[in-house]
Image (cartoon, rainbow, N blue to C red):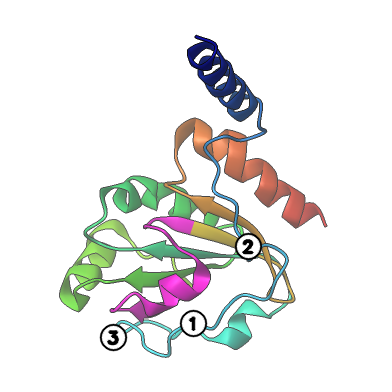
Amino acid sequence: MLIPPLVFLALALTFLWGMGRDDPSGLPSTFVGRDAPAVPQSTLPGNTQLTDAMLRQPGVKLVNFWASWCPPCRAEHPTLTELSKRLPVYGIDLKDNEADALRFLAQDGNPFAAISTDPRGRTAIDWGVTAPPETFIIDGEGKILYRHAGPLVREDYTNRFLPQLEKALAE
């Protein structure tokens, strides 16, 4: 007789604890504070090759994992274009057909200062990417300051990503 109420109480306490966390929908990254992993040494024709050295150049920069087949990537594309006017935005094209990726950039514009391609998704695994789009804020020493899973749009962009970017730029 006492077991059902105790099970209910345990579940209620677990749910209450979960709702009290800072960002219950956030996915913590074990890479924050560590050096950015290597980037692939392949690019889309006609684009600048992203290199590891670029990630270690002075100043804050972004690394965005994207794909032409990804609807949320298309939704955040105007935001990346605006951000590219303020700081370097580098792209890693994930598991994409080369022709489709080139067509997407030709149609919607190319916000990326340099691009790498990750046709098999190996680099995404090394970076801890769960699904595109994901954007990383990188400091002038090549260390990851913040990881944003999901598209850079609406309240998620203004309430979660932008404060982290402003903080990085102020340091």
Name the quarter where the C terminus is drawn. bottom right
The kind of residue on which mark 3 rests is Pro
The residue at which mark 3 appears reads as 45
Query: Counting residues from the N terminus, which is met first, the one under dot 1 or under dot 3?
Result: 1
Figure check: 19 above or below 6? below
124 or 15: which is nearer to us? 15
Q: Is 34 covered by the magenta stretch?
A: no
Q: Position of residue 99 (x, y in %)?
A: 16, 75
Residue range of the region highlighted in magenta in the rendering: 115-134
* Crowding near the residue tagged with mark 2, few <14, some 14–19, many ≥20 C-alpha atoms within 10 Å: few
Instruction: Give me the disc on residue 26.
Output: none
Q: Position of residue 159 (x, y in %)?
A: 60, 34
Secondary structure of the residue carrying tag 1 is loop
Looking at the image, which residue is at 35% across and 84% down? Answer: 43
Eye-nearest disc, 2 or 1: 2
Q: Is residue 14 visible?
A: yes
67 or 7: which is nearer to us? 7
Secondary structure of the residue carrying tag 3 is loop
Outermost residue to the right: 171
Q: Position of residue 16 (x, y in %)?
A: 61, 21
Q: Position of residue 23 (x, y in %)?
A: 61, 35
24 or 5: which is nearer to us? 5
Q: Is residue 84 visible?
A: no
Q: Give the Cα separation between the discs numbered 2 and 1.
A: 18 Å
* Crowding near the residue tagged with mark 1, few <14, some 14–19, many ≥20 C-alpha atoms within 10 Å: many
Contact between labelled residues 3 and 1, with CB atoms less than 8 Å apart: no
The residue at which mark 2 appears reads as 30
Looking at the image, which residue is at 56% across and 61% down? Answer: 136
The residue at which mark 1 appears reads as 39
